[in-house]
Amino acid sequence: MKYTKFYLLGLIFLMGCSSSEAPVDSAVESKIFHYGNGTEPQGLDPHIVTGVPEHHLLLALCEGLTSSNPKGGESLPGSAASWDISEDGKVYTFYLQENGKWSNGDIVTADDYVWSWQRILTPSLGSQYPDMLYYVMNAEEFHTGSLNDFSKVGVKAIDDLTLQVTLKEPTPFFLGLLSHYSTWAVHKETVLKHGSIDDRNGQWTRPGNFVCNGPFNLKSWELNKKIIVEKNPLYWDSDMVELNEMHFYPISVEMTEERMFRAGQLHVTSTFPSSKCTPDIKETNPNIKIHPYMGTYFYRFNTKNEALSDVRVRKALAYSIDREKIVETVTKCGQIPAYSFTPPGSNGFLPDTKIPYDVELAKELLKEAGYDSGKDFPKLEILFNTSEGHRKVALAVQQMWQQNLGINVELVNQDWKVYLSREMIGDFQVSRAGWIGDYEDPNTFLDTLRPNRGNNKTGWENPEFDRLVALANATLDQDERYEILMQAERLLIDEMPIAPIYTYVRVYQLHEDVKGWYPNILSHHHPKYIRIERD
Amino acid sequence: MLGIFFRRVLLAIPVLIAVASITFFLVRLAPGGPFDADKAVSEQVLKNLNEAYNLNAPLSEQYFDYMSGIVVGDFGPSFRFPGRSVTELIMTGLPVTFELAIYSMLIALLIGILSGVVAALKRNTFLDYIPMSIAMIGICVPTFLLGPLLVLIFGINLEILPVSGWGQLPGDKILPSLTLGFAYAAYIARLSRGGMLEILNQDFIRTARAKGLSESMVVTKHAMQGGLLPVVSFLGPAIAGLLSGSFVIETIFQIPGLGRFYVEAAFNRDYTMILGTTIFFSFMIVIFNLLSDLAALWLNPRSRDT
């Protein structure tokens, strides 16, 4: 009994610490959006950073010529109010917003774009996405050093608010590229005040220095803790913006994020722990959102490998994977079995390729290739990077190949950077891979498997495939173009340098107070449409 | 004692140089580079990036550049976070890690010494068995289990404490400090019990009691000074461990400390950041070991006399 008062005191102490109101509850009044944003962003310079968390922040802070449609599909006006496209599809004339302003009050001009694109293409800046602009006349030449005069690059300021861009080829997805942050403008005077045009380490992105043209301004940035942005009254479409502030939390552990969501500290999470996925998850947890995502999970075959250089072997391996079973019993979060490299529905593109689960056919193909019932087939290694999810899929595929084809399969688990470097130098047989589209067009997928593309990594080079993708980029008529891309996709699946497994879905939790958050295949959620309202 | 201090400080210099040199070459030997990414960059871009960070220069030149930099306290720029220097990142994470370490250590000492001393005094009673069993569990249960468990109870079920954060919501520092503190409290409890038992059987304690001193006087004035020596020796490595090893707690509770930077730097092959934090932690370990040795020397009458 004599200890009772100590226990009581302890309890009172703990109660005293209890937070009065959860952040999501107070947000109904304060209009502060709490955003679970994955990892700590590398930085906020759109020409230097890469990655999804950085993209979420930049969507709030800056804006490109076009902006991606919150419901998916055609691009919407961004800092360009409208545009004309010449008949041959090669000359784009952009008319900038008349009241488009930088957050310091300066007007957003066509010159800002010319200078910014020069910055992206300046080799010494070391931008990782310069190829997004390689479609512009002479841009690649300037970036690789064969041209030194930037005035010859196809981007010109006609007047303060008119920008003219000349392309090499018609490139029908060019408007989509412009909503990617790597093509956005930065405020020249601010960048130059804190460094030179090619300074990667300039301090202009710090709170207090940062100037950009998006719906929000940078208020504070505490490393590994949170970044706060506040509404920008100078934004041209600020009437549309309802949120007062957004708080971005870098939470790299999905379990921590899930607990924060349950405790009312977040409006949206970046992921959901796959171990908690069940077939009826949507019924048991109404906050769960599962949307198709423009990404494909696939296995890459090293076609330089002796056994795998035979297309019959690659097909046998691909045909003996039961994709339905993998999504139903292994991944379990609503993933969709993939029968093409380009995910279906990328801006209306619906590939008609098929990859049968046909063990007999697979055995027959393997026999034709000289490995009857897997006899004499060399031991096959599946390379994957450390992750419980990848391990489970690899285990399932290992079992399917062993049971269906009688071949000996070993799993090789490597740290992320080791895995990347082994893939890059071709030191693998089969490796797990994933590809997420940068813009809503099949080209963002098919282009990667053209010869000499750094992301090909399979050693597969097909001149006909290359010709078809190049031809599609030069074709203006969308139906005709999709037909050409379809041929490329069919050729790819017939050659099978990769075996698609499933189409990604975005699985995350969204608080019921959040409105104006629409599912779309790129999972771009422009903050200017987001509202907080309690029913 | 001053002699010992200077000798140890001088000895630390070659240790730190060796740590820096070995780490410098080891990180470069590890497969994968700082700019390898899912979306492979072109050769041209890779060349530009390597140039921007002086990674194209011969290794010996890079080594001497780096070593001459650290002499003047310049750990270079972080590869992962453009625009931020390693020194800035360390200085951002250090105060948080330090604060967490202090709170945890205070909790550990309070719980650990109290239960250890009581257990020793009440040997073979339930006041001994119960705290010592809990201590054994405390040593065995890892923080990555205890942390989420406490969060589940106090954060999600009882809703009286925030589940994560550091200085953002009232009370969010309690659970991480408790979790980290418990693990160390368990060690301290067992160490202080052992130390106290040994001392309590000594002749000078019997003499003190024979002189008629009160039991509390005997314990606090005479027994604890010697009985807690093992705890003092443990404190140096423990504080160094708390500073460098709270990565798990920092990750579970979303704390912006140094441990997260350290481990993430290794995953990202952020060469300068790995080097900077390794050197810094080595320095901390050397310093805290030295301090705890000095404290033990000062407390132990036998070594004081020699």
Image (cartoon, rainbow, N blue to C red):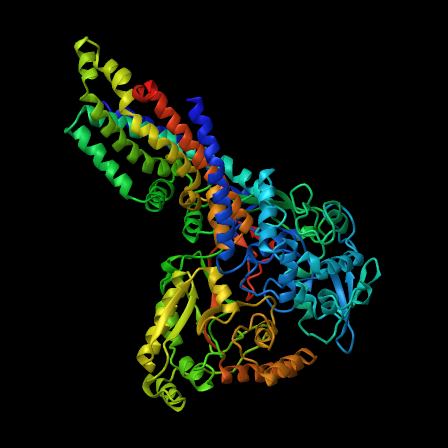
Q: Position of residue B299 (x, y in %)?
A: 34, 21
Q: Position of residue A132 (x, y in %)?
A: 66, 66
The residue shown at (64%, 45%) is A218
Q: Looking at the rendering, which quadrant does residue B186 occupy?
A: top left
Q: Is residue B245 above or below residue A300?
A: above
Q: Position of residue B259 (x, y in %)?
A: 46, 43
| Residue farthest toward the top in the current orientation of the protein | B211
The residue shown at (72%, 65%) is A143
| Residue farthest toward the right in the current orientation of the protein | A159
Q: Is residue B104 above or below residue A138?
A: above
The residue shown at (53%, 64%) is B38
Along the line of sight, the residue nearer the viewer: A365 or B16: B16
Picture mark count: 0
| Residue farthest toward the bottom in the current orientation of the protein | A368
Is there any visible trace of residue A528 in the rendered image? no
**Screen quadrant of the N terminus of chain A:** top left
The residue shown at (70%, 66%) is A133
Q: Position of residue A283 (x, y in %)?
A: 38, 61
Q: Is residue A143 left or right of residue B118?
A: right
| Residue farthest toward the left in the current orientation of the protein | B124
Is there any visible trace of residue B186 in the rendered image? yes
Along the line of sight, the residue nearer the viewer: B221 or A248: B221
Q: Is residue B40 left or right of residue B225?
A: right
Q: Looking at the rendering, which quadrant does residue B92 occupy?
A: top right
Along the line of sight, the residue nearer the viewer: A44 or B199: B199
Q: Is residue B216 above or below residue B260?
A: above
